[in-house]
């Protein structure tokens, strides 16, 4: 009797696991594949979801990552500029955002340690009344200052995998 109960329990458990796996597979729950963009000229790489696209401008100095679905507002912009003190780069970016969007609200503006040297977070409201949120991460090297900037409508911001994408940013020459 105990063998039958144990076998029956194991069989029911196995069937439940298979059913849950089948439900997850049919509902489209899966880990999106990440692709990698490498910019050899400016010395960095970054990974992004396969349902995003890459646009490169300004002779490779600027890279824009955006979801391919046309109704989304999220984006990541990477700029490589001739090296300047990183606090000055952050200040210049904040001024550029203010010039483009009018008044911006600064949430954080601070020096960091580790992968990034400076962090800036902010928000702004468009003329149409749409609220946006952004975060900019800055990295100094003797050759370039890098800015990796996220932006999306404030109510959608947390739906994007910005942190995962930002964490994947790597300098090709790790000695920098």
Image (tube, rainbow, N blue to C red):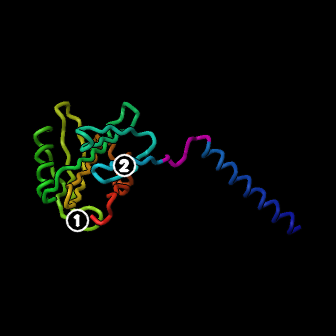
Image coords of residue 146 (percent x, y):
23, 53
Compared across the picture, whether 81 is left or right of 168 comes to: left
Where residue 48 appears, as percent x and y from the top left, is 40, 47
Residue at 23% over, 49% down: 80
Q: Residue under label 2, please give it.
A: 38
- Main SS category, magenta section: loop
Residue 93 or 58: which is nearer the viewer?
58
Left or right of 69: which side holds 137? left
**8 or 28, nearer to the observer:** 28
Helix, strand, or loop for circle 2?
A: strand
The quadrant of the rendering that contains the N terminus is: bottom right
Q: How far apart are marks 2 and 1 (CA)?
A: 25 Å
* x then y, percent, for residue 23: 63, 44
In this rendering, position of residue 57 left or right of residue 32: left
Can you tell which quarter of the image residue 50 is in? top left
The magenta span reads 26-33
Residue under label 1, please give it.
112
Q: In which quarter of the image is the C terminus?
A: bottom left
Dot in front, 2 or 1: 2
* Nearest to N terminus: mark 2 or mark 1: 2
């Amino acid at each position: 009797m105990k063998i039958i109960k144990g076998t029956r329990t194991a069989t029911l458990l196995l069937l439940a696991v298979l059913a849950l796996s089948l439900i997850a597979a049919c509902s489209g729950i899966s880990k999106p594949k990440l692709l990698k963009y490498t910019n050899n000229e400016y010395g960095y790489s970054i990974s992004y979801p396969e349902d995003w696209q890459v646009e490169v401008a300004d002779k490779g100095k600027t890279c824009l990552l955006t979801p391919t679905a046309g109704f989304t507002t999220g984006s990541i912009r990477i700029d490589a500029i001739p090296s300047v003190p990183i606090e000055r780069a952050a200040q210049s970016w904040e001024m550029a955002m203010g010039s483009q969007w009018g008044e911006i609200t600064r949430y954080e503006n601070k020096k960091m340690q580790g992968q990034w040297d400076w962090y800036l977070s902010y928000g702004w409201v468009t003329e149409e009344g749409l609220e946006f949120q952004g975060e900019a991460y800055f990295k100094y090297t003797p050759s370039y200052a890098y800015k990796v900037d996220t932006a999306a409508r404030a109510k959608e911001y947390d739906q994007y995998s910005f942190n995962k994408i930002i964490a994947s940013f790597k300098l090709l020459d790790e000695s920098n």
